[in-house]
Image: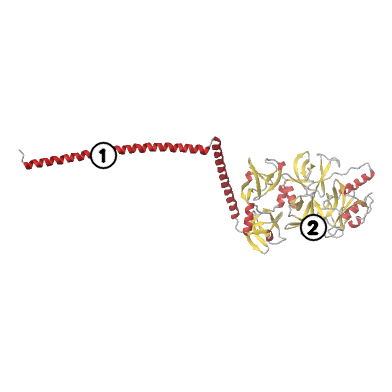
């Protein structure tokens, strides 16, 4: 039997045990409920997220459809994107080109830019009479080495020399102007490179020669050729790059000779006949004359004859070595006879009494002639026209080179068109032709001021007087007095044997020539040219007289 006290303890322990069990049971029930709630919450969130994603996708689809509208609108967007990309590429290309051009200008230290119409002479020394060793075209640039008074010592391309500072801008003004002149150019990498009319090999399409370091603006590039503003050059001999134009070396004698690939030089003292066929038919087949030391291009050889092209004439000359030179002999003769000439490339060019546009115009010259150069000035050239017969000195004849109407370079004399006049049945016409054919025989003989000898030398009026005397026509001694004989006629009325008179800068007649037909004259021109054939309007006539009728 338990005692009362023990029984109470047992009851107390049982009560505490029951309470603990209840606590554990309630705790487990609470945890179970919390777990259920958590699971429901997770399921709810998942459902909500799924619905939300679907709604978002639906909204995305709706937005895309709304933005695109239809297939055409989508295509427009793609085209806009393509155009935007092309514009971006073009902008990047232009930026790259601009950077390249700026780098070209920045490569020059003290940059000078030539501002002339035509070209500026580069001289060996800082002297207006110094030897000309190069030329700089308008907007050409140079590196200024030093300043000496009114001259800049410069380096430009292959040339080191001096230029007049008044024609050059410098500093930031020059750099800004030069940037506009940077262009894609073909820089010649070899000497004596052919410039051709068409992009193909062959002697018949060579139009000029390019020298080492010369620069030509590029027009296009195609199949191994570079088309420039001057013609086509093989891409093997040029480097195409952004560049500025620079000076060109004036090795003009070599340039004159390099224009001929198979050179022929006339060795006669006066004129060598050019014939239409490779045989001597007397006067019948003469179509031109090749002056002494004149040049031609040999096209072919045929039974003791050379077929040549010279000036505007293509025909046959004798291949006899006593009359013509070829090979190295021709080159040597050409080097000794090439002279500086003014070659006019406009129909008429004004001649002034001094190198200034304010000077008076006293005659005009023709593009049909080549005029010997007396001296070169910046923007001007003094030429030789002819010798007077009353005054041994000649007028200063100046032409401007600023408008690119004349090319000044070393050149060789070339053929002139000429056919002997036929002996006509009409007595008067026959007499005129006889006079002309007689005068032509003395072409190539000397000019001597005051002389009247057809063989030993005569001036212009002495030559005409002596020719006419042989046919019983008496003339005064001077051209001024001869211009008063006979009757005045118009140029449209001219016949062989008529006399054409020219005036000096004061308007006084001082030169006379004989018309020989076909728009040509024969005259004792000057101490340098001798008795020669020219075009009748090689300069403006003062008056024309008929003295034969």
Q: Which type of secondary structure does the marked residue at label 2 adopt?
A: strand
How many C-alpha atoms fall within 10 Å of the one at disc 1: few (<14), some, or many (≥20)? few
Place residue 154 in its image quadrant. bottom right
Helix, strand or loop under label 1: helix
Q: Earlier in the sequence, mark 2 or mark 1?
A: 1
Left or right? Give the position of 188 relative to 360.
Answer: left
Please state if 370 lies on the left or on the right of 172 as rendered.
right
Instruction: Pick the residue in front: 47 or 506.
Output: 47
> Going 65% across and 60% down the picture, which residue do you hit?
153
Q: Position of residue 2 (x, y in %)?
A: 6, 39
Determine the CA span between mark 2 and mark 1: 123 Å
Outermost bottom residue: 149
Residue 73 coordinates in the image, percent (x, y)? 55, 37
Q: Which residue is mark 1?
A: 31
Q: Quadrant of the N terminus?
A: top left
- Residue at 75% in and 43% down: 298
Q: Is residue 404 visible?
A: yes
Identify the colour scheme used.
secondary structure
Q: Position of residue 461 (x, y in %)?
A: 88, 55
Q: Nearer the viewer, mark 2 or mark 1?
A: 1
- Side (left or right) of 405 relative to 531: left
- In terms of image quadrants, where is residue 299? top right
Along the line of sight, which residue is nearer the eye, 345 or 342? 345
Residue receiving disc 2: 352
């Amino acid at each position: 039997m338990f005692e009362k006290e023990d029984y109470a303890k047992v009851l107390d322990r049982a009560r505490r045990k029951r309470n603990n069990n209840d606590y554990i049971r309630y705790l487990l029930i609470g945890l179970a409920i919390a777990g259920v709630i958590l699971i429901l919450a997770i399921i709810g969130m998942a459902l909500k997220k799924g619905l939300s994603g679907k709604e978002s996708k639906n909204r995305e689809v709706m937005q895309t459809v709304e933005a695109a509208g239809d297939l055409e609108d989508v295509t427009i967007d793609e085209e806009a994107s393509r155009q935007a990309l092309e514009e971006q590429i073009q902008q990047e290309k232009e930026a790259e080109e601009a950077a390249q051009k700026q780098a070209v200008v920045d490569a020059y230290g003290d940059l000078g830019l030539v501002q002339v119409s035509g070209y500026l002479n580069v001289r060996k020394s800082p002297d207006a009479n110094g030897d000309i060793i190069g030329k700089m075209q308008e907007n050409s640039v140079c590196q200024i080495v030093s300043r000496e008074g009114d001259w800049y010592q410069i380096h430009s391309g292959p040339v080191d020399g001096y230029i007049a500072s008044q024609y050059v801008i410098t500093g930031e003004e020059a750099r800004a102007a030069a940037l506009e002149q940077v262009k894609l150019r073909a820089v010649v990498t070899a000497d004596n490179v052919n410039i051709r009319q068409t992009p193909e090999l062959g002697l018949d399409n060579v139009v000029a020669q390019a020298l080492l370091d010369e620069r030509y603006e590029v027009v296009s590039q195609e199949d191994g050729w570079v088309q420039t503003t001057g013609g086509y050059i093989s891409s093997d001999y040029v480097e195409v790059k952004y560049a500025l134009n620079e000076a060109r070396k004036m090795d003009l004698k070599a340039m004159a000779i390099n224009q001929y690939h198979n050179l022929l030089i006339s060795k006669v003292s006066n004129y060598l006949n050019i014939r239409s066929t490779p045989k001597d038919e007397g006067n019948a087949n003469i179509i031109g004359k090749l002056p002494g030391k004149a040049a031609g291009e040999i096209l072919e050889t045929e039974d003791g004859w050379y077929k040549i092209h010279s000036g505007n004439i293509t025909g046959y000359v004798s291949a006899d070595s006593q009359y013509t030179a070829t090979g190295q002999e021709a080159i040597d003769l050409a080097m000794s006879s090439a002279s500086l000439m003014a070659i006019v490339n406009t129909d008429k060019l004004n001649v002034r009494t001094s190198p200034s546009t304010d000077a008076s115009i006293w005659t005009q010259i023709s593009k049909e002639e080549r005029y010997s150069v007396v001296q070169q000035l910046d923007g001007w050239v003094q030429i030789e026209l002819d010798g007077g017969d009353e005054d041994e000195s000649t007028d200063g004849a100046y032409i401007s080179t600023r408008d690119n109407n004349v090319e000044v370079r070393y050149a060789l004399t070339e053929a002139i068109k000429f056919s002997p006049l036929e002996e006509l049945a009409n007595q008067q016409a026959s007499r005129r032709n006889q006079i002309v054919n007689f005068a032509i025989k003395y072409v190539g003989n000397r000019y001597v001021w005051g002389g009247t000898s057809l063989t030993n030398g005569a001036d212009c009026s002495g030559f005409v007087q002596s020719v006419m005397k042989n046919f019983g026509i008496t003339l005064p001694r001077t051209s001024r007095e001869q211009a008063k004989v006979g009757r005045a006629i118009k140029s449209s009325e001219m016949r062989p044997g008529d006399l054409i008179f020219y005036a000096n800068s004061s308007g006084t007649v001082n030169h006379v020539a004989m018309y020989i037909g076909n728009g040509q004259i024969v005259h004792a021109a000057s101490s340098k040219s001798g008795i020669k054939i020219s075009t009748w309007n090689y300069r403006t006539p003062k008056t024309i007289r008929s003295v034969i009728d």
